Amino acid sequence: MSNDTDEGTAVHVGVAERVITPDLGVSMSGFAARKGVAGGVHDDLHVRALVVEGPEEAVGILAASVISLGQELVDRIRAATAQQTGLDGSRILIAATHTHSGPTIEGDYEPFLERRCIECLAEAWEARRPGRMGIGLAQVDDVGRNRRRLEYGGLPVDPEVGIIKVEDDAGRILGVFFAYACHATTMGPDSLLISEDFPHYAIRTVTQGIDENAVVAYLNGAEGDINPGYSSGLSAVGAPIPIRNFPFAEKIGSRLGRA
């Protein structure tokens, strides 16, 4: 992994994390075929923030473990963060991981999510300290597959994992943010458990490998027709798909985390 700063250049980095798990009984998003509301929590949902401040400008990244974030919500988060911190809202990337095992963004949950996102970015800003940032690329096989071409033996998918690592000036890793293109849809419409899906296991694998206190976040890439490996046609008609379970999510998530 390369250090993207020159010797002597002052860089300050900060990270933060907040839990955004909804109350049970909320409507879940992602599948029209799903019947029922959230009945349990397999693993918590989170927002995770990274701020990097250089000598001339600062940037932020926020990853939220929800299916999507509307433009108006994103605009409000950016504006409030800018007002609280001085971080330019136009320099904040805000992304949803696109988990299909999370809540619908509506009702009381939306303002709760908004507050958590603002708090997380503000905490990362306040936590910034002298450090370094590195960027790198890895590759992983047999995680994502083209969901519309499985019956023809599959088509190549992008194996690339983009990585940002930040550490303090003593060399302790503070955070790792990584991007990979794949729908977080291992669990299907029959699941009523809240979960980050396979990214949960990828994040767990990374934290176990570096530091349990580090903030590790997944960012989805241009996922398009890339999913964990089942046919979109079979899924659309509700056919049983044996790989849509947590053991398989752990298998592919751990593989991604090791990469």
Image (tube, rainbow, N blue to C red):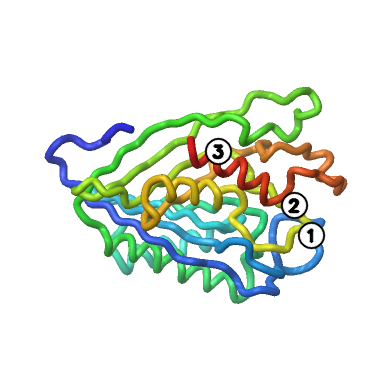
Circle 1 SS class? loop
Is 235 rendered above or below residue 100?
above
Q: Earlier in the sequence, mark 2 or mark 3?
A: 2
Which residue is painted at 54% across and 44% down in the image? 220
Is 232 rendered above or below residue 86?
above
- Report the Cα–Cα distance between label 3 and label 1: 28 Å
Which residue is painted at 29% across and 65% down in the image? 85
Question: Which residue, given by chain and number where applicable, does mark 1 sit on?
Answer: 34
User: Could you say where residue 94 lies in the image, as x and y percent from the top left?
Assistant: 46, 53
Amino acid under disc 2: Gly
Mark 3 surroundings: few (<14), some (14-19) or many (≥20) residues within 10 A? some
User: Could you say where residue 255 lies in the image, as x and y percent from the top left?
Assistant: 55, 38
Question: Which residue, given by chain and number where applicable, does mark 3 sit on?
Answer: 255
Amino acid under disc 3: Arg
Question: Which residue, given by chain and number where applicable, does mark 2 sit on?
Answer: 188
Circle 2 SS class? loop
Q: Nearer the viewer, mark 1 or mark 2?
A: 2
